[in-house]
Amino acid sequence: MELIRRPRRLRQSPQIRNMVHEVDVRTDDLIYPVFVTEGEKVKSPIASMPGIYHYSLDQLAVHLKEVWEKGVRAVIFFGVPDHKDACGSGAYDPDGIVQRALRLTKSLYPDMICIADICLCEYTDHGHCGMIRGNEILNDETLKLLSKAALSCAKAGADVVAPSDMMDGRIGHMRQVLDAEGCQNTLIMAYSVKYASSFYGPFREAADSAPAFGDRKTYQMDYRNCREALIETELDIMEGADIIMVKPALAYLDIVRMIHDNFDLPLCTYSVSGEYAMMKAAAANGWIDERRVVMESMTAMKRAGAKMIITYYAPQIADWIREENK
Ligand code: PBG
């Protein structure tokens, strides 16, 4: 038999495979989520997310040193405040926990890209991402508070604000407020395509942000839908988003691919808490090779079209990449 085309020729040695391969995960692509909390000497583990902790600011400083030295250059902060109320005032308190974390991080590592997740759910006593009236999640009333939160984080040093609430019109509102206050250079990374997902389970335990009633389906997207993602992204871009995002990641790579092919802005995907928990649990049982499964998953996200990946594995992956390049 005479075979003209032999794809296996390109796979015959590691050198040839390395020469022709298409996609790499780089440490520069990674964004590391960090939970910050009140108090001192707090480093409390999150049961469903082995290796992930709540850090008080003094412990954050210790952890950041490690993260910086591994080569991770972007962090996204989530606040776990002591105090919650109906209007989530901790989110826009100039001395809120995330605002203080931003000031501290910028003072220690001015070149660390500091991203502030902007949402009310960690700060509201009802756990929803917006203001409520009865059982209704109010849209327009929420925008002002989100913009206030974004502005206070920008003033505290955030390079990027990342609204994760899924209210309509939030990007445009936020852009105007930021610009009016002299924050033209603050980037907006929009959680443009955020599905109502059960993969957020461990995060809600970590952030103590599970909704007290109902669910998030009136604002987060229905996972049975695909084309809606185009509308959401188009709106965010028209309103001024600099970076767009698809969340979750692994079960949504079709959406990542679609958004990548339709829009030209840098695309981020968020490998969420449930994805991390599943890989950690299987690894702890010896059922998968953690390093290989994680790297394969991250590579798949990049192959689908993501430029950046938010992942709880970021520092670990940075180690693996460094070892690989030795
Ligand atoms: C806040 C927010 C959530 C996540 C990021 N920002 C939770 C939610 O929407 O319920 C989830 C992150 C994760 O699961 O890792 N709205």
Image (tube, rainbow, N blue to C red):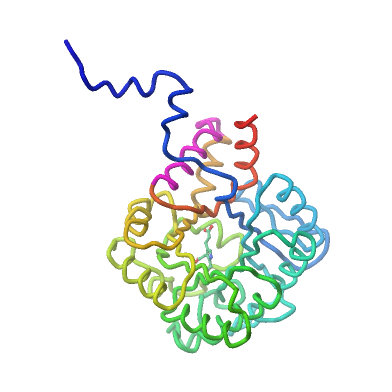
Q: Residue 56: image x %, image y %?
A: 77, 62
Specify the quadrant of the image occupied by residue 285. Answer: top right
| Residue in the picture at 42% in, 84% down | 136
219 left or right, relative to 150: left
Q: How many marks?
A: 0
Q: Residue furthest top?
A: 1
Residue pictured at 54% horizontal, 69% vertical: 162
Toward which corner of the image does residue 325 lie, by quadrant? top right
Q: What residue is drawn where x is 69% and y is 54%?
A: 53
Q: Is residue 9 above or below residue 38?
A: above
- Residue 306 or 249: which is nearer the viewer? 306
**Residue 296 within the segment the image draws in magenta:** yes
Q: Quadrant of the C terminus?
A: top right
Q: Main secondary structure of the magenta part?
A: helix
Residue drawn at point x = 79 percent, y = 58 percent:
61
x, y percentage for residue 312? 59, 50
> Can you say whether 227 is above or below 130 in the image?
above
Quarter the N terminus occupies: top left
Q: Does the magenta portion include 15?
A: no
Displayed quadrant of residue 180: bottom right
Which is more toward the observer, 296 or 24? 24
The residue segment tinted magenta is 285-303
Image location of residue 233, percent across then percent down: 38, 68
Expressed as whole percent of the image width and height from the top left, the position of residue 282 reads 52, 37
